[in-house]
Structure formats: C-alpha cells, structure tokens
Amino acid sequence: MRLKHKIALFTVYFVLFSALSGMVDYYAYDAINPWIFIGLSFLAALWAVIVHAKSHEKSKVDELAQDIEKIV
C-alpha cells in the first residue's frame, strides 16, 4: 500500500470520525471541550488506517481514498 493511499485513507477516516464526534459534541451542548473530540478523532483515524492496512481487504473506503488521490 502506497503512502499516498494511506494518507487518503486517513483523510476519509478522520473526516468520518470528526463528523460523528461533532454531532456528539453538538448534542452535548458543548459540555465537553471540542479539542478532546478532535484528538480522539485523530487517534481513531490513525488506528483505523493501521487496522485497514493490515487487513488487506478492499472496501468502499478504498474507493473514496482513490477519488481523493485523483483530486490531489
């Protein structure tokens, strides 16, 4: 797996986790510091890329990552 593909995968996962945690933060009425959600999203995206790279299975996320690679 190329580095460019891993970066694109990270971008897809980070946007996904950031959107989900943003919704949680919105409904928590900003009771929790948003930087905690950003940090947790970063760690979750990093973990997801590592697990995805080790599994060697193609999924919809790979298609989204390839679209990002074409744009960049």
Image: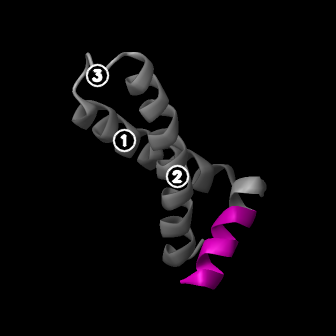
Marks 1 and 2, how far apart at CA: 10 Å
- Residue 26 location, x and y as percent? 41, 25
* Circle 3: element type: loop
* Circle 1: element type: helix
Q: Main secondary structure of the magenta part?
A: helix
* Numbered tag placed on residue 43 in the rendering: 1
- Residue 9 location, x and y as percent? 56, 60
* Circle 2: element type: helix
Residue type pointed to by label 1: Leu
- Residue 70 location, x and y as percent? 65, 83
Q: Which residue is mark 2?
A: 49
Q: Are marks 1 and 2 in contact (CB under 8 Å)?
A: no
Residue type pointed to by label 3: Asp
Q: Is residue 11 magenta?
A: no
Residue 57 appears in the picture as rendered:
no
Decide if residue 52 is on the left or right side of residue 40.
right
Q: Is residue 68 magenta?
A: yes
Residue type pointed to by label 2: Val
Marks 3 and 2, how far apart at CA: 28 Å
Which one is nearer the viewer's eye here, 45 or 31?
31
Decide if residue 4 is on the left or right side of residue 22.
right
Q: Residue, x 43% and y 34% (percent of image)?
A: 22
Which one is nearer the viewer's eye here, 9 or 52?
9
Q: Which residue is mark 3?
A: 30
